[in-house]
Image: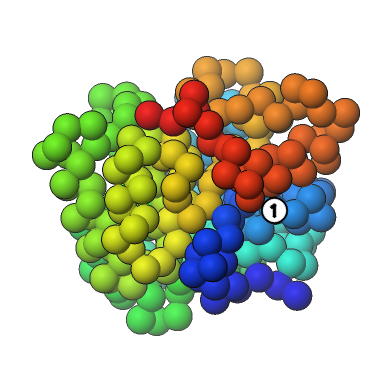
Amino acid sequence: MRKTLSTLQGMRDKNEKIAMLTCYDSSFATLLEKSGVDVLLVGDSLGMVLQGRESTLAVTLDAMAYHTACVASGSTQAFIIADMPFGTSQVSPRETFVHASKLMVAGALMVKIEGGEAMAETISFLASRGIPVCAHIGLTPQSVHQMGGYRVQGRSEHDAQRLLREAEAVARAGAGMVLLEAVPAALAAGVTAKLQVPTIGIGAGVDCSGQVLVLHDMLDIYQGKKARFVKNYMQGAASIGEAIRNYVREVKSNDFPAKEHSF
């Protein structure tokens, strides 16, 4: 049976960790969900790990819809989230709805939008019209040039308070999930305690409702620079399937992320 947003909310309420990985094709979709992955994120990270680009900014909506359809065709159980690529949500709420609809038609069950308070109106517009939204705050890769690089967010008291306000704003607007990227573990724990919806961490400590990594990073396929929060799960694993199962097991048991993968 297909996992739903209600399933994930129930896991959060029972303090059962959510295991998420990025996925871009049918074969991996089947393998990941058979290995126990709860959520498949069709990430715009495909721009780097599949297309060989320096950032995610050049990924198109058509590319995201194509890969979402590929993932959906190989999945029968996992919850599927698709990233809104750069330039498709930084427009009017109505235009964003049109773009998000394309991903939903392709097979997504939720779309992920980068940005905090500035995106609250858009999140509300989508959620009130039947499109579930995961809000992505903290380090937002689509804003990498504005941020001056891939830097940890929320280190100062001022920035921590701002991030907490953003988390509360997107939740009030109707976000059904909040992804926290590259924020101090203590701050992510505080945000998670404040919100009533699941939080997913990537470089945000062990206290989030769940964890996500880029598939090609945790399988040591991508040869570019990897962030501190990445763990190579191929080490000590006899197969890709075993590596994925080890990741799921460690997320569920709170063994990942460890301190060395957190800020």
Q: Is residue 35 above or below residue 221?
A: below
Residue at left 32%, top 27%?
151
**Residue 106's spot in the image, x, y percent?**
62, 66
Does residue 148 appear left or right of residue 181 in this picture?
left
**Residue 226's spot in the image, x, y percent?**
53, 22
Q: Quadrant of residue 168?
A: bottom left
Quadrant location, the C terminus: top left
Q: Nearer the viewer, residue 109 or 86?
A: 109
Residue 75 visible in the current orientation: yes
Does residue 70 appear left or right of residue 120 in this picture?
right
The amino acid type, in three-letter code, at marker 1 is Val
Q: Quadrant of residue 131?
A: bottom left
**Residue 123's spot in the image, x, y percent?**
32, 67
**Element class at badge 1:** loop
Q: Residue furthest bottom?
A: 129
Quadrant location, the N terminus: bottom right
Does residue 192 appear left or right of residue 232 in this picture?
left
Does residue 128 appear left or right of residue 213 in this picture?
left
Residue at left 29%, top 43%?
187
- Label 1, on which residue? 37
**Residue 115's spot in the image, x, y percent?**
30, 51
